[in-house]
Image (cartoon, rainbow, N blue to C red):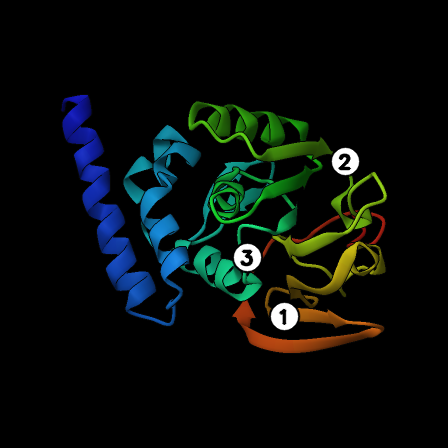
Amino acid sequence: MSEYQNKDRFALVRRRMLEEHLIGRDITDPRVLEVMAEVPREEFVSQSYLSQAYSDGPLPIGMGQTISQPYIVALMTQELRVDGECEVLEVGTGSGYQTAVLSRLAKKVYTIERHGELSESAQAVLGRLGVGNVEFYIGDGSCGWPDERLFDRIMVTAAVPAIPQSLIDQLADGGIIVAPVGFGGVQKLIACEKRGEKIIEKFICDVRFVKLFGEHGFEE
């Protein structure tokens, strides 16, 4: 199969993913749909999983981590309500797929990954795709970004027992955190809006994520 035919094949399955798994459910934000139609998920999965690049399920990426299913990526992005003025903190770079999606909607993305190998791989892929508004950090994401700063939006892409206070402290007033929260194999996807000293929570749906290990996450 030629490179052109291969790219065309992915364009077709990406469109099918959009229509069946996103538009066919509850993803309605046109900006999110546009970005999901543009970001090549096949670039973020290993060769052995290329045939499943647009199936609506998670895939292993090594180090005991996964790339989330397209629907959950789109749902979390939609709930985060990112615009072009937002600076976003992503806790859990993983493959870099969610990072790429956020980078097309936000002013800048700051992303933390505790596995150096995954961070380096994500940096390489995002570099090939020409993404230039992302800053990377290797460390404990449960502690937040190492510098004292505030973010308009925070996304946690691994399960936490509770949303760490360290992340709440780095959320700007009026900002939003989206995170899977809970113990066991099933968590609750929560969107939290910060209004002064109050945190307003909204339950979105039940989800399954790998755990976030760290000082304010789960113990290994």
Q: Position of residue 67 (x, y in %)?
A: 49, 45
Residue under pointer 1: 190
- Asked if residue 53 shows in the view, the reply is no
Dot label at residue 139: 2
Label 2 Cα crowd, 10 Å radius (few <14 / some 14-19 / many 20+): some
Crowding at dot 1, Cα within 10 Å, few <14 / some 14-19 / many 20+, comes out as: many
Residue at image location 22% in from the left, 32% down from the top: 7
Q: Position of residue 13 (x, y in %)?
A: 22, 47
The residue tagged 3 is 82
Q: Earlier in the sequence, mark 2 or mark 1?
A: 2
Q: Position of residue 39 (x, y in %)?
A: 38, 41
**SS assignment at label 2:** loop
Q: Is residue 183 visible?
A: yes
Under mark 1, the amino acid is Ile
Tell me: residue 203, above or below residue 146: below
187 above or below 64? Answer: below
Along the line of sight, the residue nearer the viewer: 165 or 135: 135
- Residue in the foreground of this view, choosing between 59 and 205: 205
- Amino acid at dot 2: Gly
